[in-house]
Image (cartoon, rainbow, N blue to C red):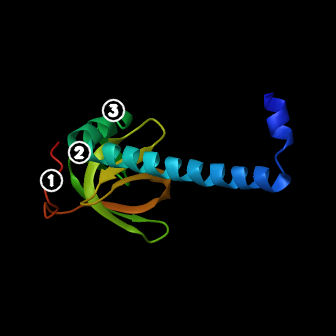
Amino acid sequence: MDILGLLSTLTWKDILYAAIVAFFITQIIITLTSGRKIKQNNSQINPKDILTRCKLMFPIDTVKFDGKIFTSGMAIKIITQNKKIIEGKLVGRNDSNVLCVITDHHIVVHDISQISQMYQISQKIEDKNEF
C-alpha cells in the first residue's frame, strides 16, 4: 500500500483529533522539561558569584552625593524621589551614574539622578554580604 493512499482514507475528524493529541503531548513535554531546568538553575546560584558580578558591573567604589562621599561596603539609606526607602550596603556605581545596593533580600540598582536623599547609617544591617 502507498502512504498517500493511507492518508487519503483519513477523515477530517481523524486529522483534527491527531493534531489536538499532538498539541497536548507537546505541552506536557515542554512543561516537564522546563521545570527541570528551573530547578537545576536555582540550585546552582552562589551568592558570592552574584556579588562578584555586581562588583564587575559597578566598578567605581566611591559615590559623591550632595557633597558627601560614600564608599563601597558602607551601610546606607536611600530615599528616592518616589519616596521609596532602600537600606543596604553600597556595592558601587558605574559610568552611567547608576548605583548598586545589596539589601538583606534584594539587589537594588538605581539611577543617582532619581535619588532625593542618601546618608550613612549605623552597621545594623546583617553582614551576610561580605565585601
Residue furthest out toward the front: 1
Q: Helix, strand or loop at disc 2?
A: helix
- Dividing the picture into quadrants, the one containing residue 51 is top left
Residue 117: percent from the left, percent from the top?
A: 38, 63
Query: Which residue matches tag 3?
Result: 56
Label 2 CA crowd tier, 10 Å (few <14, some 14–19, many 20+): few
Residue 10: percent from the left, percent from the top?
A: 82, 46
Q: Residue at x 15, y 63 (%)?
A: 122
Label 3 CA crowd tier, 10 Å (few <14, some 14–19, many 20+): few
Q: Amino acid at mark 1?
A: Lys
Query: Which residue matches tag 2?
Result: 47
Query: Which residue matches tag 1?
Result: 128
Q: CA distance from mark 2 to mark 1?
A: 9 Å
In the rendered image, the vertical position of residue 95 relative to residue 103, given as above or below:
above
Residue furthest out toward the top: 2
Question: Which image quadrant: the C terminus?
Answer: top left
Give the left or right position of residue 22, taking residue 46 as reference.
right
Q: CA distance from mark 3 to mark 1?
A: 19 Å
